[in-house]
Image (cartoon, helix red, strand yellow):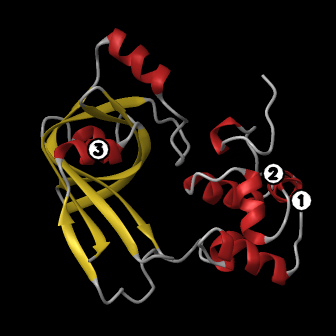
């Protein structure tokens, strides 16, 4: 099936051969825009958007400003200038409100994979560890090393948290799941988890020990405008 620049974002070939291109493509897809639609927003054509996403382009600052405005983001976000900054540095909106999320919405936001944080008790006090995770059925699963703190936490109650902060709109959400963590030993389940894993753990190293959390409680909140 041929893919065109005017089709839906999901139907286009993976793009982003530079960090700028990858960030541009990701933001465009978050907004559900085709390349043609993104180009119309910033006064360019789909071919130019494709060029920026797929080639080692160095657009002028004026072009970057127009593209950032079209994608409801900032030049700093597109160029990676904020990579080492924690999210949420902007001023809060005046009409913000915190609303509770339903169980279904919480599970939808957890999605199938991503990066979350596991909070456990250790001999030295509470510890929080970021992990790449997948959702398999009702379980949240992640990999670690066999002798890591998380592996030694098997059989204890932990909290798993995932969130998203949009620095441009100053809105966001968080989901918290609480349950017992345990090591996965069933051979068939291990094969299934390996099959659905989106990627290797970002931390690298030999992290092949699967752990899973079966939530007994999931809650979430979202910051919205009134």
Q: Are marks 2 and 1 in contact (CB under 8 Å)?
A: yes
Q: Provide residue 38's location: percent of width, then percent of height.
A: 72, 60
* Left or right of residue 160, residue 11 in this image: right
Q: Are marks 2 and 3 in contact (CB under 8 Å)?
A: no
Mark 2 vs mark 1, CA separation in Å: 7 Å
Residue at coordinates 35% horizontally, 9% vertically from top-left? 188
Q: Provide residue 23's location: percent of width, then percent of height.
A: 67, 60
**Which of the two residues, 159 or 74, is positioned nearer the viewer here?**
74
- Locate the N terminus and report the quarter of the image it occupies: top right
Residue 52: which quarter of the image?
bottom right
Q: Are marks 3 and 1 in contact (CB under 8 Å)?
A: no
Q: Which residue is mark 3?
A: 150
Mark 2 vs mark 3, CA separation in Å: 35 Å
Question: From where the camera sits, is residue 80 visible?
Answer: no
Q: Which residue is mark 1?
A: 56
* Left or right of residue 10, residue 192 in this image: left
Q: Provide residue 4's location: percent of width, then percent of height.
A: 81, 38
Give neighbour class at mark 1: few <14, some 14-19, many 20+ (Cα, 10 Å).
Answer: some
Give the mark, 3 or 1, whose residue is nearer the N terminus.
1
Q: Secondary structure at mark 2?
A: loop
């Amino acid at each position: 099936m041929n893919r065109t620049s005017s089709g839906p974002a999901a139907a286009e070939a993976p793009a982003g051969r530079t960090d700028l291109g990858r960030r541009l493509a990701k933001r465009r897809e978050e907004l559900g825009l085709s390349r043609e639609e993104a180009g119309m927003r910033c006064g360019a054509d789909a071919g130019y958007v494709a060029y920026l996403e797929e080639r080692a382009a160095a657009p002028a600052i004026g072009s970057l400003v127009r593209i950032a405005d079209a994608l409801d983001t900032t030049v700093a976000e597109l160029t990676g200038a904020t990579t080492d900054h924690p999210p949420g540095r902007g001023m809060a909106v005046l009409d913000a409100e915190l609303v509770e999320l339903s169980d279904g919405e919480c599970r939808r936001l957890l999605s199938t994979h991503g990066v979350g944080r596991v909070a456990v008790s250790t001999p030295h006090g509470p510890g929080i560890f970021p992990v790449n995770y997948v959702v398999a059925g009702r379980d949240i699963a992640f990999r670690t090393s066999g002798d890591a703190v998380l592996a030694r936490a098997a059989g204890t109650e932990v909290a798993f948290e995932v969130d998203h902060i949009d620095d441009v709109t100053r809105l966001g959400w968080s989901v918290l799941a609480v349950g017992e963590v345990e090591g996965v030993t069933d051979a068939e389940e291990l094969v299934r988890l390996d099959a659905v894993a989106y990627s290797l753990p970002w931390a690298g190293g030999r992290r092949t020990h699967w752990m899973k959390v079966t939530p007994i409680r999931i809650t979430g909140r979202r910051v919205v405008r009134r």
